[in-house]
Amino acid sequence: MNNAGVKRAAVLGSPIAHSLSPVIHRAAYRALGLDWVYEALAVDSEQLPGFISEMDDSWVGLSLTMPLKESVLDLLDVVDGVAARVRSVNTVLVGEDGLVGMNTDVIGVVRALQGAGLTSATSATILGSGATARSAVAAAADLGVTEMSICARRGDAAQSVCAVAADFGIAATPHGLEPLASFLAVDLVISTLPGDIAAHWAPVASAGAGALLDVSYYPWPTPLAAHWPTPAIANGRDLLLWQGAEQVRLMTGYEPPIPQMRAALDSV
């Protein structure tokens, strides 16, 4: 992995070929005049410890996607407060303090929804129960949500997300994934499900009363977004842009060049 003199960063995950993170990070580096390298590397949970142990001092940071956001926790020297509370790390900084785990998904969700016109909410439904769902809970808390439904395939996973919600002062109740209109008649719906699974909710999407963030972005619009009755819709590209912008700020120390990053994302 040695590449003397060149600063390196990468997005890790499995699968990873679909990732658009290199597009926005490379655009940021160009705009900032940084001769840095950013790659997409296929790494699964079993391979992650070995990969990290082989990193040299050319590395400045990592972006993490599934299935690594939780499995990385035991490999870090420091875990930031929000990342620890939601048990989800999507950003690793390499520096004098060792490996520092952080979460930029939370701010990414908030800014994506603000871009769609949502500045506050009191009620929400989250579809899904993985790492992104836990980050969505923290983002919902930042927006003022006090009551929430967690709809997930597995009851124990839904209960786990409810426990995170309670830590943020949100009264949350677990439910199954049966598409019911009542779960969509809230201020905010965040779907963290794969597009094909979230598609089962499309027949009741007309009950949507507030904003929607569907973290899927290919193909777009997703079936759920296509049937959503309000214009307050954000997608995974919006989330990707804003969480990536915060990663750029943390890794480089510079303010992220949002217009250039957005233009690069819109071009693909």
Image (tube, rainbow, N blue to C red):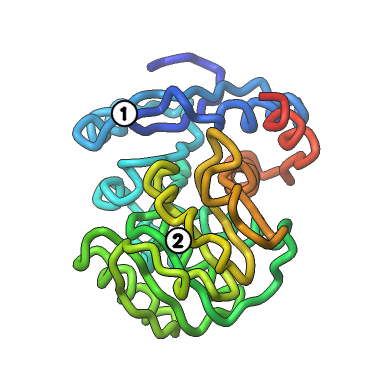
Marks 1 and 2: CB-CB under 8 Å?
Answer: no
Query: Does 42 sit above or below residue 174?
Result: above
At a point 53% along the width and 79% down the height, the residue shown is: 123
**Image location of residue 105, percent across then percent down:** 51, 54
Query: Does 104 sit above or below residue 236?
Result: below
- The C terminus: image quadrant: top right
- The N terminus: image quadrant: top left
Quadrant position of residue 42: top left
At a point 44% along the width and 79% down the height, the residue shown is: 168
**Image location of residue 229, percent across then percent down:** 65, 60
Q: Secondary structure at mark 1?
A: loop
**Image location of residue 4, percent across then percent down:** 50, 15
Q: Which label number is shown at residue 88?
A: none
Would you call the spot at circle 1 few (<14 residues within 10 Å), some (14-19), or many (20 or more)?
many
Query: Does 37 sit above or below residue 252?
Result: above
Q: Is residue 246 visible?
A: no
Q: Nearer the viewer, mark 1 or mark 2?
A: 2
**Image location of residue 218, percent across then percent down:** 53, 34
At a point 64% along the width and 46% down the height, the residue shown is: 238
Q: Nearer the viewer, residue 99 or 152?
A: 152
Q: Secondary structure at mark 2?
A: helix
Can you identify the residue that label 1 sits on? 43
Spatial CA span between label 1 and label 2: 22 Å
Q: Nearer the viewer, residue 135 or 10?
A: 135
- The amino acid type, in three-letter code, at marker 1 is Val
Residue at the limit of the structure toward the top, as seen here: 3
Q: Earlier in the sequence, mark 1 or mark 2?
A: 1
- The amino acid type, in three-letter code, at marker 2 is Ser
Quadrant position of residue 232: bottom right
Can you identify the residue that label 2 sits on? 135
Count how many numbered circles sit on residues in the image.
Answer: 2
Residue at the limit of the structure toward the front, as seen here: 203
